[in-house]
Image (cartoon, grey):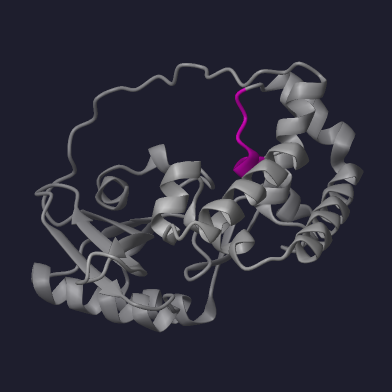
Amino acid sequence: MSKVDGYKVYIQLQQLKEMGFSKSQIARQLEISRPTLNKYYDLNIDEYEQLLQSMTTRAKKADQYHDWILNYLREYPDIKASEIYYWIQEKTNGDPGFSEGTLRNYIRELRKEYNIPKTKSPRLYEAIEDPPMGQQMQVDMGEKWVFKADKIREIKLYLIAFVLSHSRYKYVEWFDRPLTTADLIAAHENAFQYFEGIPEEVVYDQDKLILYKENYGDLIYTHQFASYRHKRKFRIHMCRAADPESKGYAKYMIM
């Protein structure tokens, strides 16, 4: 979102707020996400100007990667901002100094300035046979905003989904707080009990609860999860970073 667009959204948001619209109504009316709504909702005009200034400062930090990002955009026009952000995290030991959202806006402006539209190359797929029973399970974690019982207020819930790749049997656990590695391990145990067995292989996304970092193909797991994996002795298949299509059934459960 550009500064001009952001300012328009802020003004419209405040006007709707003064008219008595609820947060959910404002978000739908302006077609903005709940996090964006919450970021602007309680700000007065001075605080909003300070926020703009801080966003500009963070965007300037991305300037040091300007030429590198531009070359990638020209060579791979369909590249995702999340992939570029992941690579920058690798270069900076996980601390680029700006958020993925800041980089996404920065890349959007680069595309406009240098006329590099995002073209989507068709991805080739081929049918593969389902693995045998007991061989593979897929796991994914996500978040969902849901209405409370009063149908007015919303709450963010966190979930862990398990799917057996052969039978498509499913198991899901919900939480009203951010997940921890201990939650993930406990949910695994409950899923194994529900499925009455442990698969030979488990498929995961590159999540911080599981993976500390990837170093040129070498996977370094978090200490707690590495100990659990050693105890249960299942193989791990780690999907490519920022590529949900490389994992199937579990991802569709939380979309």
Q: Is residue 216 visible?
A: no
Residue 220 is left or right of residue 141, and the answer is right
Residue at 29%, 62% in the rendered image: 146
Question: In which quarter of the view is residue 39 placed?
Answer: bottom right
Task: Inspect this view and state whether residue 16 appears.
Answer: yes
Residue 71, how many percent across, how many down? 81, 26
Residue 77 is inside the magenta segment: no
Q: Which residues are magenta?
A: 78-84
In the image, residue 6 lies at what x, y percent?
Answer: 69, 44
Q: Is residue 241 left or right of residue 193?
A: right
Q: How many marks?
A: 0
Q: Nearer the viewer, residue 163 or 15?
A: 15
Please state the horizontal and vertical placement of residue 121, each as a whole percent of the image.
Answer: 52, 17
Confirm whether the magenta stretch covers residue 79: yes
Residue at (19% x, 78% y) in the render: 190
Residue at x 47%, y 68% (from the top left corner): 210
* Relative vertical location of residue 225 with respect to residue 44 in this rendering, above or below: below
Comparing 34 with 218, the one in front is 34
